[in-house]
Image (spheres, rainbow, N blue to C red):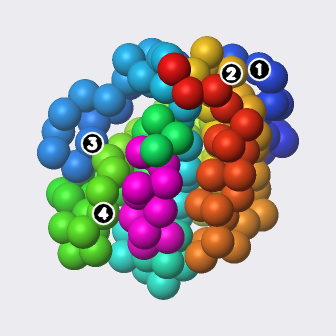
Amino acid sequence: MADLLEPGSVAPDFEGTNQDGVQVRLRDLRGRPVVLYFYPQDDTLGCTREACAFRDDTDAFREAGAVVLGVSVQGESSHREFREKYRLSFDLVADPDRQITAAFRAVAIHGLAKRVTYVIGPDGRILAAYRRLDPKSHSKEALRVLSGVRKR
């Protein structure tokens, strides 16, 4: 797969459903920064660390006015169990057909999502893109990027 989408480019719009079957569309979040992170699989060691780090930073993301969305290729029921088990405070978007993952250049060779994170500004433009991440600490990096974004 090609490199990540470039900072400064407009993030591709997408439509998906969250863990509860509720539609999630990127265009509906315009005006707010979005942290869109892709992860390989629900309830695995690295993915759990990553999700819990975002959960633990919930107040800081809210203060920044940001929405956090996790995306993987598992379905709604898997996401619902994962979210409930770890009391995650953000939506997990189901992408079993890999359309969202492909649009953001995050599909791994084996079909799961790569660990990729995009920080998207309120105008829909990509502020930062990361492929190599420490699952426990990259939420702090996303917050650092968001600190430069004006609150509306």
Q: Which residues are magenta?
A: 52-62
Q: Position of residue 132 (x, y in %)?
A: 77, 63
Alpha-carbon span between mark 3 and mark 2: 23 Å
Residue count near mark 3 (Cα–Cα under 10 Å), binned few <14, some 14–19, many ≥20: many
Residue count near mark 2 (Cα–Cα under 10 Å), binned few <14, some 14–19, many ≥20: many
Give the mark nearest the N terminus, 4 or 3.
Answer: 3
Disc 2: which residue: 125
Disc 1: which residue: 9
Q: Residue at x 46, y 44 (%)?
A: 63
In terms of secondary structure, what is the magenta stretch mainly? helix
Give the mark nearest the N terminus, 3 or 2.
Answer: 3
State the mark number for residue 89: none
Give the mark nearest the N terminus, 3 or 1.
Answer: 1
Q: Residue at x 38, y 17 (%)?
A: 28
Q: Nearer the viewer, mark 3 or mark 2?
A: 2
Alpha-carbon span between mark 4 and mark 2: 26 Å
Disc 3: which residue: 18
Give the mark nearest the N terminus, 4 or 2.
Answer: 4
Q: Residue at x 20, y 59 (%)?
A: 80
Residue count near mark 1 (Cα–Cα under 10 Å), binned few <14, some 14–19, many ≥20: few
Q: Mark 1 and mark 2 in contact (Cβ < 8 Å)?
A: yes
Q: Is residue 92 above or below residue 12?
A: below
Alpha-carbon span between mark 4 and mark 3: 13 Å
Residue count near mark 4 (Cα–Cα under 10 Å), binned few <14, some 14–19, many ≥20: some
Give the mark nearest the N terminus, 4 or 1.
Answer: 1
Disc 4: which residue: 88
Alpha-carbon span between mark 4 and mark 1: 29 Å
Q: Is residue 63 left or right of residue 91?
A: right
Q: For the N terminus, which image quadrant? A: top right
